[in-house]
Image (spheres, grey):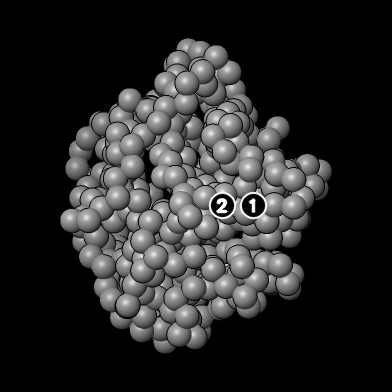
Amino acid sequence: MKRVLIWVLSLWSVVGIGWSRSEDGLQELKAKDRLLSFLEKDAVSPGANSLMIPLTLIQGAASKGAVCLDGTPPGYHLDRGFRSGSNSWLIQLEGGGWCNTIRSCVFRKTTRRGSSKFMEKRLNFTGILSNKAEENPDFYNWNRVKLRYCDGASFSGEGQNEANQLYFRGQRIWSTAMEELMAKGMRNAEQALLSGCSAGGLASILHCDEFKDLFPSTTKVKCLSDAGLFLDATNMAGGHTLRDMYRGMVTLQGVQKNLPNTCTSQMDPTSCFFPQNLIANIQTPLFLLNAAYDAWQVQESLIPSSADPHGFWRDCKMDHSHCNSSQMLFLQDFRNQMLSAINGFSMSNQNGLFINSCFAHCQSERQDTWYANDSPRIGNKAIAASVGDWFFDRTATKAIDCPYHCDNTCHNLIFK
């Protein structure tokens, strides 16, 4: 079992050091941003033979109101396909959490998650975005796009806050980006895959049927959600951290009007931002790739520092091998909730699954987890092979791992 060490300036540094409440809140926002950055680090850090793709800002987006939180234009990175992949398109929606309060959104617009001013000018394309057959066997020669995430509501908001100069325009960014890419050749696609990681994985669920509707019925269209199965779970103190966050974000950013009415006609808007309440009604073939003990959800939803002020869960949170038996039972219950949430979804022949019992997050963008000699496997099949078999209808893929700790192929994230 590979242990991937992630060095994070302690999330606990925001507790008990005597800052003012204002400073304390800012430090917590910075800590959360650092966590996201470290989870994404391997996907964006260049190596010796990296494929660095330049950022393209969408010209004319501002005239349509399709702007980042700070009013700057959105952007994407496109690497053109070649040979047999010239008319195939893969759209990867970037992740990076959400902002649910004026304060957190104001902070966010000072980062690349809220402003194109701070986005990297070139991004490393790795994993599912690689252009090498030995790293990405089924999609390496497709047109591959990384759509940057700068709205803080999984490309779904609609509104603004004039007093704080905040623009909640995620839905417009999505629509404008799709228009741009269709004009650049995607309208001629013979096959297309909408993918995404984390908040982008949730966005790929929210926009899956919209994506399908862009194309004629002759185009093969499917969707992949990586680490996007965020559960409406109870934290270790009995609170509902993620539900509370989503409630604030849905209200602040005007997300309700862009949620599927198949859900909002039966449930409250906050519930309809949780994938478990959406996946049963998605018509387009969908693949769910998720770690059963998702590292971000363990850190931020199940064991948030706000619910553990005395640090009783700190060691378990940072390194699962330090969890005692009762703590591990709590985490096993989270896995059981995940399996229950996908039970109906898994019955459809058109859908796919890869749920491995790892402490990981975003396994399609990292080369070591997507496709490598020692990458995670279920039944001796790697993630890339599983997704490829599903997309091309080579074989049905409904892979669910045995419970922790029977899988010795995991690349588990350990926080220090």
Residue kind at label 2, given as amino acid type: Ser
Going by the image, does 351 lie left or right of 322?
A: right
Residue 388 figure quarter:
bottom right
Name the residue beneath numbered marker 2.
88
Label 1: which secondary element? loop
Label 2: which secondary element? strand
Residue kind at label 1, given as amino acid type: Glu
Q: Is residue 298 above or below residue 52?
A: below
Task: Give the numbered dot on residue 12.
Answer: none
- For this orientation, the residue located farthest to the front is 83
Looking at the picture, how far across and down is residue 195, in whole percent?
53, 53
Looking at the picture, how far across and down is residue 130, in whole percent?
38, 57
Name the image quarter holding the C terminus. bottom left
Which residue corresponds to the image point at 37% horizontal and 28% vertical from the top-left? 116
Q: Residue 254: tell me if it is visible.
A: yes
Of the numbered discs 2 and 1, the one sitting upstream in the chain is 2
Name the residue beneath numbered marker 1.
190
Residue 134 figure quarter:
bottom left
